Amino acid sequence: MKRPVQDPRIISPSQYIAPNIDQFLFSLLASLIIFWSLPTTAQLTIESVPPNAAEGKDVLLRVHNLPENLGSYTWYTGGKVVNSHQIVSYVIDTQTTALGPAYSGRETIYPNGSLLFQKVTLKDTGYYTLLATDKDYQSMQVTGQLHVYPELPKPSITSNNSLPEEHKDPVVLTCEPQTHDTTYLWLINSQSIMNSARLQLSKDNRTLTLLPVTRNDTGPYECETRNPVSAGRSDPFTLNVVSELPKPSITSNNSLPEEHKDPVVLTCEPQTHDTTYLWLINSQSIMNSARLQLSKDNRTLTLLPVTRNDTGPYECETRNPVSAGRSDPFTLNVVSEQNYTGYSVRTIVGRVIGALVLVALGASLGYFLYLRRTRRYHGISFTLTLILPPDPV
């Protein structure tokens, strides 16, 4: 019986020789040393200086970690090497520059490969690609990005309603102008405004809606605009909120003024914002005069001094753009000599003398009757003279 022929590729257990562990470790260590000793090539990168450019300023696309033995550089717009997008190229040995179809006249290439943009515009924002070719015609490319932002103008606030009515009208405040890549922030009384049930901010924060407006919403409001290169704040904006005016009434600083002596100040109540006041006497408008003086806002009327002809009736009117009201008639009680509740000196003296006369007549009559009864009356006569004091001045 034939023995089976063993496959020479298969090592039998009797033929297996264990490796030398020391030799294995030495070989592994040598491999690691060789790996760590290999020179590393830094990655080619592009840096924008500054990272965020303001419109109208200069920007440099700086190249880092260029390999040695380079022959030329070529810059392109966009993220790919496309001939129609070529801006400029530079040959190192001859120091010559060639302009491409995408050259705008504002780009300058330097011997180190960096590219300068002068007076950048918003349209310059985007990707730029550098193609670096060595003298063996081996190429490498890298893409960088340029960010250009506008210098923000000073913002301002506009309103969709110049005279909103309280508890009725919504108001939309807008931060102007609208600009790209801009953050908007709202403040009231110098405090940040957050979204709420009645104060609603748009998705981009550019508009603030008040639902509805109240008298406490007058402000002042400010809006801020920000982007990576600038910031601005608007002037304060005050909202004029008008109400449903209440019925006015008239008050006086003196309930019983004395004629030709006391001044009287009449006031139209209540005091309300953005309200026009008007005075009437006997349904006729009152104008300023030497004796009838109106305050600057027409809310008070002063009589200097009061006379018996100033009793009224007076009325005051209040008006604003959405409503008007008129007070009930007001009559002024002016105290004069004719209607004073006391008595003049002449009247008092006259009444005293009259009483004395009555007493004297009574005594005389009694004495006369006494003499008659006693038969002693032989014709007695008497004269009573009354002297009245002069009228007081």
Image: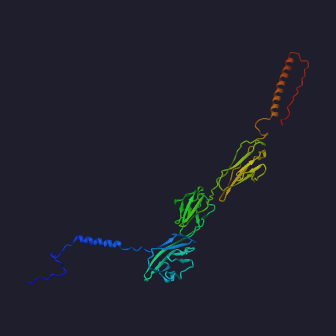
- The relative height of residue 71 versus residue 27 in the rendered view (above or below) is below
Taking the image as shown, residue 329 lies to the left or right of residue 206, namely right
Taking the image as shown, residue 228 lies to the left or right of residue 312, namely left
Percent from the top left, x then y, of residue 51? 51, 69
Percent from the top left, x then y, of residue 374? 86, 15
Q: Quadrant of the C terminus?
A: top right
Q: Quadrant of the N terminus?
A: bottom left
Report whether residue 257 is seen: yes
Q: Residue furthest right?
A: 379
Q: Quadrant of residue 120 in the image?
A: bottom right
Taking the image as shown, residue 91 lies to the left or right of residue 308, namely left
Q: Give 155 or 81, whichever is nearer the viewer.
A: 81
- The relative height of residue 46 versus residue 372 in the rendered view (above or below) is below
Q: Quadrant of residue 380 in the image?
A: top right
- The relative height of residue 1 versus residue 120 in the rendered view (above or below) is below
Report whether residue 211 is seen: no
Q: Residue furthest front?
A: 93
Percent from the top left, x then y, of residue 343? 78, 35
Residue at 82% from the left image edge and 26% from the top image edge: 356
